[in-house]
Amino acid sequence: MTVVCIRMRLIGFKEFTKVEDAVRKLLSHVNVDLDAIELPINESLNYVCAEEVRAPYDIPPFDRSAVDGYAVRALSTTSASPFNPIYFKVLGTIEAGDDVSNLRPVGEYDTYLVFTGARIPKGADAVVPIEDTVLEGDEVRILRSVPPYA
């Protein structure tokens, strides 16, 4: 077996440089201090945290919608498209501040219209943005799939 190798022409360069040598040369010209320092938060613009920062509790303390749309089970939207819409029964509307504890959980092809900031009802794990839906009476056509927790 014969292998043909082509050596690239050195356009604008006199010689090849190994990657390791190029990185070493580059880093020799970079002066970066990677030591951690403590700053008041109001002076920390353009800095990067040196360690993970975690809140002691979730804010808000519940799952909520980031958009106006329909709360669904993400798996039920698989393969949805404008040419292959999936129909869901609209069970009601949830606004920001509404109590959802007594609402019927979202089933396989059930949904609630939810507004930005509203709690996500039980059984739902995603919200389809209203722009990707068409309301028809008490049903809504879902025109695209959504991943869980979207």
Image: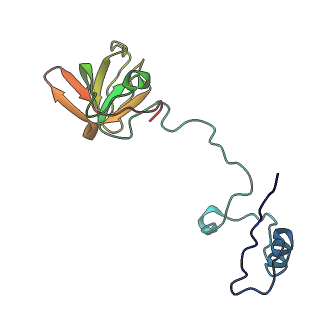
- In the picture shown, does residue 43 fall above or below 25? above
Q: Position of residue 135 (x, y in %)?
A: 18, 29
Q: Which residue is more in the foreground, 31 or 6?
A: 6
Residue 97's quadrant in the figure? top left
Q: How many numbered marks appear?
A: 0
Look at 82% across and 76% down and name the residue there: 17
Q: Residue furthest left?
A: 137
Residue 91's quadrant in the figure? top left
- In the picture shown, does residue 38 fall above or below 12? above
Query: By what rule are the colours in the image chosen?
Result: rainbow
Residue 95's quadrant in the figure? top left
Q: Position of residue 76 (x, y in %)?
A: 39, 21
Q: Position of residue 143 (x, y in %)?
A: 28, 33
Q: Position of residue 39 (x, y in %)?
A: 70, 65
In the shown orientation, is residue 113 left or right of residue 117?
left
Look at 74% across and 69% down and name the residue there: 6
Quadrant in which the C terminus is drawn: top left
Q: Residue furthest front?
A: 1
In the shown orientation, is residue 35 left or right of residue 140?
right
Q: Which residue is more in the foreground, 8 or 79?
A: 8
In the shown orientation, is residue 135 left or right of residue 85?
left
- In the picture shown, does residue 104 fall above or below 62? above
